Image (spheres, rainbow, N blue to C red):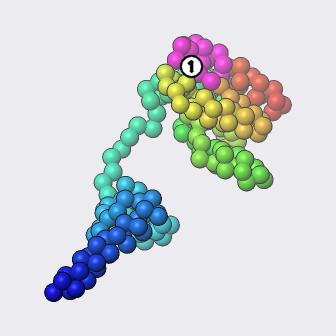
Amino acid sequence: LSIFAGFILCMLFGGLGANWLRSSRSKMPWRPRGRYVASSRPNLSNILDPADQLRFVMAASFTPTKLLSKSEARVLYVAEAVIAEAGLKWRVMAQVNLGEILRCADQRAFAAINSKRVDLLIITSAGDPVAAIEYQGSGHFLSTAAARDAVKKEALRRAGIGYIEVTIEDTAKDVRGALTKLIEQSLLKAA
């Protein structure tokens, strides 16, 4: 009986010991085999399949969110008014992805700007980008926001697209002045 009990104890502790050894090698905490533990990261490997995408969307609930903050919306309305007063058939677009308006042969440079957005983009009646408007609110200097904006600004400059930075201190009159100057420069350049 003692040999049998020793064998059972060896198997029991040996199995746990083997699990512990395997888990310590992978730097993961030990978990009993066969037990499902929810990961904090979802498995997104199958998100590329449209059928899976539809299944995920149908199982989720969505809520609308604002496209622009109140301050960004005020800048949008000022820009639209200035363009209308100038008699131009230009448009102001909100939250435009830079990957949609800029092209670059350098894949690394394109990847650096592809997922970045500008708050507002002024386009001509032909759809050509004229200028980006970025509203720098109170959180602009937090984290890496200023560095991300520098990347956007440089890419737009290299593409010949104007850039207007509106700060929290700027008045509607300041925005009008910057836009009027930009319109004059753009019309001179086009002539």
Residue ID at (56%, 19%): 167
**Secondary structure of residue under mark 1:** strand
Residue 39 appears in which quarter of the rendering? bottom left
Comparing 186 with 156, the one in front is 156
Residue ID at (81%, 26%): 188
- The residue carrying mark 1 is 167
Residue ID at (72%, 38%): 155
Is 59 placed above or below 182 here?
A: below
Span highlighted in magenta in the image: 165-179
Is 102 placed above or below 27 here?
A: above
Amino acid of disc 1: Thr
How far from the left and from the top, in percent, is residue 12?
26, 76
Residue furthest to the left in view is 1
| Relative side of 151 to 19, left or right | right
Residue 126 seen in this snapshot: no
Examine the structure image and report whether residue 67 is included in the region drawn in magenta: no
Residue furthest to the front in view is 2
- Where does the N terminus fall, quadrant-wise? bottom left
